[in-house]
Amino acid sequence: MSFQAPKGTFDWMPPRSERVLAVRDALAAPARRAGYGYIETPAFEDTGLFSRGVGESTDIVTKEMYTFEDKGGRSITLRPEGTASVMRAVIEHGLPGGPLPVKLWYSGSYYRYERAQKGRYRHFSQVGAEAIGTEDPAVDAELITLAVDGYASLGLSGVRLLLNSLGCAECRPAYRAALQDFLRGLDLDEQTRQRIEINPLRVLDDKRPQVQAQLTGAPLVTDHLCGACKAYHEEVRTLLTAAGVKYTDDPRLVRGLDYYTRTTFEFLHDGLGAQSAVGGGGRYDGLSEMIGGPPLPSVGWALGVDRTVLAMEAEGLFDAEPATVDVFAVPLGEEAKRVAFGLVVELRRAGLSADMAFGGRGVKGAMKAADRSGARFALILGDRDLAAGAVQLKDLTTAEQTAVPLAEVADTLKGKLS
Ligand code: AMP
């Protein structure tokens, strides 16, 4: 019997998997430079954290959660997103009693039972950042800028930023009511009608053309913002412009999680087909109280690592595969193999990346392995050279070969590779 990765999941394998590491590092780097500390939370939580935090009426909670009962009879859910867990941890550890905002970044796997297609998986990876406990448009602008800089550092030129404000507890109810009035007059199926009553903003997010066509005259949230929300949003926009960040106002932008207030944003890439969102986030001033914490106005984002790799591939940003090591040793015989093993260990301890041929494949196979590794140098260890205490150092780009005394191999290579 053989097995395959479960439906909707896949394996990142070398050498392509290197791209995942590169993307994860690059997306996190700007946040780390801005003082965000690393947080790691469990991959599963009490189910209630997500149903309350993400929202009972969202697709994530109603259709997409991996929920099970553990052996102790608790209802457990594999995390579908990161923010609720981070907020739970911040409250649990009493951080709101210290300096605010609490700035944190994270990276990991998330799980949603989605209809699998290109760019949409049941297991995927995100880098996230959250600034918890401060209501200040500069924090919103900081986070957005950090994401923009992360994408830019990867060389991506096709990422677009959409920006909106969803208002607050003051102004959202009146907007919600106006939107419901409008939506109730449309020709919609029963399920969408139910959605109007539970979460009307989500109807704006409906992708079906027959629904979109009817939404042309829908009231816009930006026309219903209270004075405070309007001023707040204006300041976020001013700061973004000052930071050289280009964005498009999109008054229809709502997001699939219930906890958002005020600033919301999404990063899109046009090279990905239907699943064009490479990242998104926003302000979630009510989340802490929804999960039993103190008032903690906060803002954050999550950027999709898998989709960012796909976006970079669509832009042709990865050309040649990276070399796995700089140096590859090819021993010609049993005794040579022992010497090669010791030499490779020594090189690694000296900080060089080195590998050797294993498995006694013969010279031809070993040289092929050296080529395939992408190494710039091969070390060829034959009996005659070894008797003289030397090895052949071959530059695989020029085919130039010289004998180097064993004791000098590390220093010679270090000089050539620096
Ligand atoms: P969300 O929490 O839904 O806003 O997701 C943030 C980002 O994570 C999205 O913009 C995507 O790039 C990525 N993402 C979300 N869901 C998936 C999925 N099912 N498969 C792959 N990437 C995803």
Image (cartoon, rainbow, N blue to C red):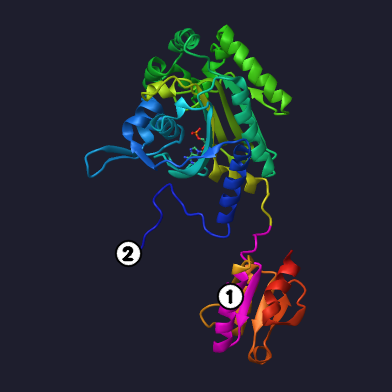
Q: Position of residue 65 (x, y in %)?
A: 36, 36
**Mark 2, residues whose alpha carbon is within 10 Å: few (<14), some, or many (≥20)?**
few
Residue 228 included in the magenta stretch of the image: no
Q: Would you name the residue on which mark 2 appears? A: 1
- Residue 53 lies left or right of residue 120; in this view the side is left
Reply above or below: 160 against 320.
above
Reply above or below: 324 against 249.
below
- Residue 382 lies left or right of residue 337; in this view the side is right
Reply above or below: 227 against 68.
above
Give the magenta part as a residue range: 320-348
The three-letter amino acid code for the residue at tag 1 is Met
| Residue appearing at x 64%, y 66% in the figure | 352
Q: Quadrant of the N terminus?
A: bottom left
| Residue 194 found in image quarter | top left
> Ligand 1: does it lie within 8 Å of the C-beta at label 1?
no
The three-letter amino acid code for the residue at tag 2 is Met
Going from the N terminus, do you reach mark 1 or mark 2 first?
2
Q: Position of residue 327 (x, y in %)?
A: 65, 71
Can residue 250 be seen in the rendering of this structure?
no
**Mark 1, residues whose alpha carbon is within 10 Å: few (<14), some, or many (≥20)?**
many
Residue 322 included in the magenta stretch of the image: yes
In space, the residues marked 1 and 2 are separated at their CA atoms by 34 Å
Secondary element under disc 2, as helix, strand or loop, is: loop
Q: Would you name the residue on which mark 1 appears? A: 356
Q: Position of residue 74 (x, y in %)?
A: 25, 38
In front of the other: 274 or 201: 201
| Residue appearing at x 35%, y 40% in the figure | 66
